[in-house]
Image (spheres, grey):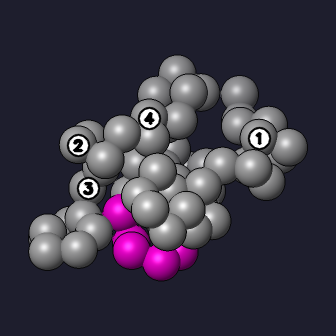
Amino acid sequence: MALDPQLLEILACPDTHHAPLTYDAEAQTLTCTQCGRIFEVRDDVPVLLLDEARGGPGQAS
């Protein structure tokens, strides 16, 4: 099951810039279009926690 397209339209990065996210259905990830953080989607639920994100400012992916 994929994420609902309406949900994808309103999801944003939880950091202060609240940039849009792009969805990779195959990898089951959401990527911030501004900072590059990668958030996992587990059991069709986006995990938008900065502490659990990969990559982003000052971090290696």
Amino acid type, mark 4: Val
Spatial separation of the CA atoms under disc 4 and disc 3: 11 Å
Using residue 45 as the reference point, say whether residue 52 is left or right of it: left
Magenta-highlighted residues: 33-37
Spatial separation of the CA atoms under disc 2 and disc 1: 22 Å
Amino acid type, mark 1: Leu
Q: Nearer the viewer, mark 2 or mark 4?
A: 2
| Earlier sequence position, callout 1 versus callout 3 | 1
The residue lying toward the viewer, choosing from 51 and 4, is 51
Q: Which residue is mark 1?
A: 7
Q: Mark 2 Cα within 10 Å, few/some/many (few <14, many 20+)?
A: few
| Earlier sequence position, callout 1 versus callout 4 | 1
| Earlier sequence position, callout 4 versus callout 3 | 4
Q: Looking at the picture, how far across and down is residue 28, in whole percent?
A: 51, 44
Q: Looking at the picture, how far across and down is residue 9, in whole percent?
A: 79, 54
| Earlier sequence position, callout 2 versus callout 1 | 1
Q: Secondary structure at mark 2?
A: helix
> Mark 1 and mark 2 in contact (Cβ < 8 Å)?
no
Q: Which residue is mark 4?
A: 47
Amino acid type, mark 2: Asp
Q: Which residue is mark 2?
A: 51
Amino acid type, mark 3: Arg
